[in-house]
Amino acid sequence: MNREIRVDVDVAKAALALSGETKRQALLLLRPPMWLNGLISVLAASATIASAQASHSSLWTFIALGTSAVLLALVLGWCCYLKLSGVSVKSPLGYSPKSTTRNLALALFSAFTVLLGYHLTQQGNWQFAYLAGLLIGILSGVGLYKLPTGEWIPQDRGNE
Amino acid sequence: MSKACFDPLIHANNRLQICALLESVDEMEFSVVKAQLAVSDSVLSKHVKALEQAGYIAVNKRTSLARQRTWLSLTRAGEAAYQRHVAALREIVGF
């Protein structure tokens, strides 16, 4: 039963490359298409700008709520599409400790940016609403393109 | 971090690819795994059975939209074994 397999460096390298490339393929399946990525990023930026300028019942509040709802619907829609296509996504905290930490750090940094943008805008510095929006838009776009699960998608080779 | 341990069962190319594919997702449908690996139904079934018998993957058949679909997922034991195997390969390579 205890079969002995001799693995030399070249075989191990080939196996690692194969595993890395396959993992990359799996991550690419989870990456949203560019048009959806762009739409989600623009909506995230708009929601940040609108929420930073929102006050009680202004038009900005309505825009912030509307864009946030559409944003949520698009993300859920993408997850449903993946499920119908035969790929079920893990929860953002269900990945490896490294990816989970990265997801949490990204979420905390985004929340901090939104709150800081809101706070500074409410103090009269309206430019910060747009700065926070731009930052969130870029973060969302790069995050969805390169880190759809919290794991960095390597360029074309395996992740070794 | 799990210790490195070479696993002959996972080392076969197709089985290594199955584990690598399933590690990043919660579940993946049999047909998607088949398309990614570019193998036939029978070849994939054989490898899936071997991994299932070792307790490395779970196979669930569910009906959705009037169609039976077979979902594959990596078990905790399978995920740990795959990570230990990759760690062992890295040790051999010298990373």
Image (spheres, coloured by chain):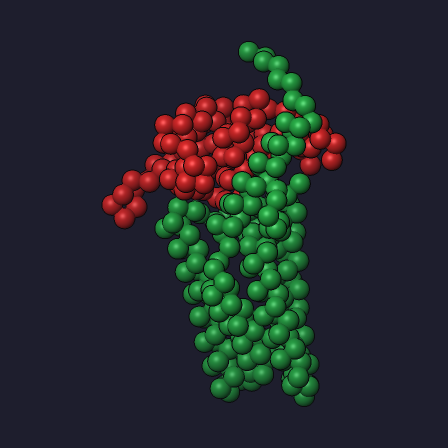
Chain colours: A green, B red
Residue A84: tell me if it is visible. yes
Taking the view exactly as shown, the residue that stands out farthest to the top is A1
What residue is rendered at 66% in x and 84% in y?
A: A127
**Residue B89's image quarter?**
top right
Quarter holding the C terminus of chain A is top right
What residue is rendered at 47% in x and 81% in y?
A: A62
Asked whether B63 or A141 is in front, the reply is: A141
Residue A20 lies, in percent from the top left, at: 59, 40
Quarter holding the N terminus of chain A is top right
Residue A8 lies, in percent from the top left, at: 68, 23
What residue is rendered at 56% in x and 58% in y?
A: A145
| Vertical comparison of B45 with A73: above or below | above
Left or right for B72, reference B23: left
Residue B21 lies, in percent from the top left, at: 51, 40
Left or right for A6, reference A64: right
Taking the view exactly as shown, the residue that stands out farthest to the right is B94
Left or right for A30, reference B3: left
Residue A115: tell me if it is visible. no
Asked whether A73 or A115 is in front, the reply is: A73
Count the marks: 0
Asked whether B85 or A71 is in front, the reply is: B85
What residue is rendered at 36% in x and 50% in y?
A: A84
| Vertical comparison of B41 with A32: above or below | above
Residue A136 lies, in percent from the top left, at: 61, 70
